Image (spheres, rainbow, N blue to C red):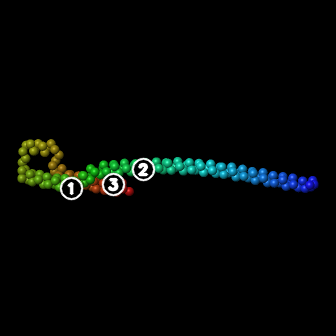
Amino acid sequence: MNNFQIDAIVKIVLQQGIEIAKLNSALQNSEAKEREKSAELEETLKQLELTKIQLIESEQKISSLRQLVAAITIEINNPVTFIYGNIKYVKDYFHELMQLIKLYQKHYNMPVAEIEQESEEKEDIEFIMQDLPKLFLLIILAVEMRGLIKILFEL
């Protein structure tokens, strides 16, 4: 082999060495980028796991809150339902008693001293007879609102 051939081979080897160095550098850059992407993906995965845990905890809190609201609704609804179911009877009984009192007043307009004294100490019977039906109406309206509240809680 002559010098010319050796020089050509050396030149080829040097060019290949330069190419190998460039490829090696590109490979190292690519590996660094992939490691960076991998680290970012791992961080994203950690954030997703944390978000998932927080979401589960929030769902559990909401579920507990729903159960609490349902229990409170039942506790409120039970006496309200009792009142609603019986207010008509109370109103009817009151009406009957008021009619009876009016009959007594009509036929026994001179009450004994004890009744006279008791009625003076209490509120005016006429006022009570006028006000109580209004009060019953207000109670009925308030109790009927329970239906609206119940619907809202079911939403």
Question: Which residue corresponds to mark 1?
Answer: 88
Which residue lies under the disc numbered 2? 62
Describe residue 89's horizontal placement relative to residue 5 as left or right. Answer: left
Type of amino acid at the residue the image marks with label 3: Ile
Mark 3 or 2: in front is: 2
Q: Please name whichever residue, 21 or 146, is drawn nearer the observer in this view of the structure.
A: 21
SS type, badge 3: helix
Say which residue appears at 9% left-offset and 54% top-offset: 103
Q: Position of residue 96 (x, y in %)?
A: 14, 54
Crowding at label 1, few (<14), some or many (≥20) Cα neighbours within 10 Å?
A: some
**Along the line of sight, which residue is nearer the eye, 15 or 93?**
15
Amino acid carrying label 2: it is Ile
Q: Residue at x 11, y 51 (%)?
A: 101
Where's residue 124, x and y in %?
16, 47
Res. 149 mark: 3
**Residue 108 at x, y percent in the picture:** 6, 50
Mark 2 or 1: the one toward you: 2
The quadrant of the rendering that contains the N terminus is bottom right
Q: Residue at x 18, y 50 (%)?
A: 128
State the SS at label 1.
helix
Task: Compute the Cα span from label 3 to label 2.
Answer: 19 Å
Mark-to-mark CA distance, 1 and 3: 21 Å
| SS label for mark 2 | helix
Residue 138 seen in this snapshot: no
Measured Cα–Cα span from mark 2 to mark 1: 39 Å
Going 11% across and 53% down the picture, which residue do you hit? 100
User: Toward the viewer: 111 or 5?
Assistant: 5
